[in-house]
Amino acid sequence: MKKWIRIKGVAAFIIITIALILFTRLFADLLIKNAIETTGTLLIGARVELAEVDLALFPPGLTLTKLEVTNPEAPMTNAMEAGHIRLSMEALPLFYGKIIVPEISATDVRFATKRTHTGAVTPREKKTAIPDPPSDKSRLSLPSLTIRDPKRILAQESLSSVEEAQKIKTRIKALKTEYKERLAALPDARDFAAYEARIKALKSKKLEWRDVLGKAGEIKKISEAVNEDLAAIRTVREELTRDIAHLKERIEKLPELAEADYHRIKKTYGPSAQGVDNATALIFGDAYAGKVESAIRWYQKIAPLLEKKETSGEAPHEKSEEADSIPRTRGKGVTIAFKEKHPRPDFLIKKGQFQGEGTHGDLSGTLENITAQQPLVGRPLALTLSGKALTDMETLKVTATFDRVTPHSARDHLTLSGTGMTMHPIGHKETLRMKGARAAMKGEVRITSGTDLTAETAATLTDVHFDFPTEATTIQRAIHGTLKDITTVSIQGAARGTLADYTLSVSSDLDDHLKKALKNAVSELTTQFDGALREAIREKTGAPFSAANTDFKGILAMEGDLAQRLQKGKSLL
């Protein structure tokens, strides 16, 4: 008679089952915990920690206790913390190596909580680095709110007028040397005195009528010699006159050059209202830029998880001769994915719910279609989040979709709104600083093709208080007088471009008030700067200008000498 039940088979089954249960109880929880912490840490770039993991087999499920995800930009703060996370899994897909989670729930979820120890990790070299968005936004630069000492400016700045005066002085020196030599070669007073003596001698002689013709010939020779000397003197004088006229023209233009130096230095170093066309950026610009950059960094960490990189391979029946020639390793096989009639993603969380209650307020939300293979699901990942009585915020509402249903056509959309937000001190203490306020805001972000960014936000601030230093500057006093009575502010912000190269704009109804205050203060500072600059330029140009004029008088004396020689020569004719 045949035995329907084999004792050895039953015993083997029982032993294997017990071994699996023991392995699950003893090691599976630890392995899963380590896998979640290690993978999460690599993805986030900061420590991900779990207090406990509990795996259930019948029915399949998993419970995570106290999950902490560190904010990589603030290692002593958790970006997110969850007290308990429970999820169930479909049993059948597990046999095909697929994890399908019908529902997951998280309780006691909190954001931005303090850590007891740092969550920083040693950075590792990445094979493909994600480009960081631009951090240095010159479009949000601050205008100059102080004036420099003009004397210190001129100590390092060259003046065109001083350089020209020095060139004139050098030119006059060269001309003096040249004309001194030429004047020495020309007839002078002694030469003309000799002519005069000869003429007097001829006039004093009593000649016979036969000697009159000889006397006339001698006088003619003297006259011709005098005319030749006068022609030489006239030539030198005309050339000297032209050089003097040119020098005079250059000297007369020195004040104009000094004025041009003044305007150039004033434009370069003087107080300017340029940069206050968007005065709101003085307060909110840097903070807004920082928030945008932080959001982009988080998006760039999450985006790669939304799409699975498919690997191409040959079908089993399309083996090439080259593939046949590759030596096979014993015990090693090839994973072949056969076409499924109803394909499922490798990993899918159909629906997730999370909530947090307690001292940090009430927070709840849903997540749907969490997978890296959205084309197989046919629906995008969707997020909703709402909260009330939160820390530093009365209400919060967020909706987001990350659409990868159509390959190579990513479309991501996020909207958010909040009321009763507590605004902490923001701005620059040395320029403009808002000490505190309450805010209600709305925002919308669109990212297409994974790179093109369009973001717009609008906020209304109430109970606004501005902070001003005890020892205020002229501009800060002007701003204080303008802002001291303002308690409500409307702000608009935008970011447009690509994730790697975008432009920011921040504006508000403060702009007109601030521009007026700043321009009035700049006008006052400009008046002070102008007076000091003009005095400094006069002081620096005084000696060179005076030297040029003194040397010019010296060369004018040469021209006077030539004029006297001409006059003396003409008197002989």
Image: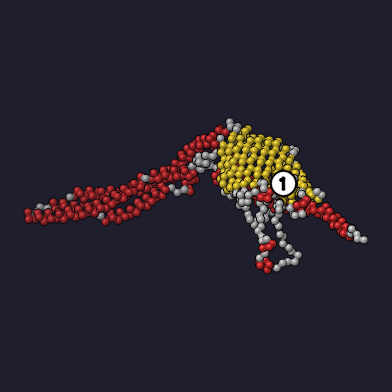
Rendered location of residue 73, percent (x, y): 66, 47
Element on which disc 1 rests: strand
Q: Horizontally, is 431 left or right of 91 in the view?
A: left
Identity, as a three-letter code, of the amino acid under mark 1: Lys
- Name the outermost residue toward the front: 1
Q: Which residue is mark 1?
A: 350
Colour scheme in the image? secondary structure
The spot of residue 471 in percent (x, y) is 58, 37
Residue at x 66%, y 51% (from the top left corner): 307
Of residue 44 and residue 517, the one placed in the foreground of this image is 44
User: Is residue 216 visible from the viewing direction of this image?
Assistant: yes
Q: Quadrant of the N terminus?
A: bottom right
Q: Label 1 neighbourhood size at 10 Å, few (<14), some (14-19), many (20+)?
A: some
Nearer to the camera, 69 or 236: 69
Q: Tell me which residue sits at (72%, 40%) in the image.
A: 364
Residue 125 percent across, percent down from the top left: 66, 56
Among all residues in the image, which is located at the extreme top? 485
Residue drawn at (68%, 62%) of the image: 317
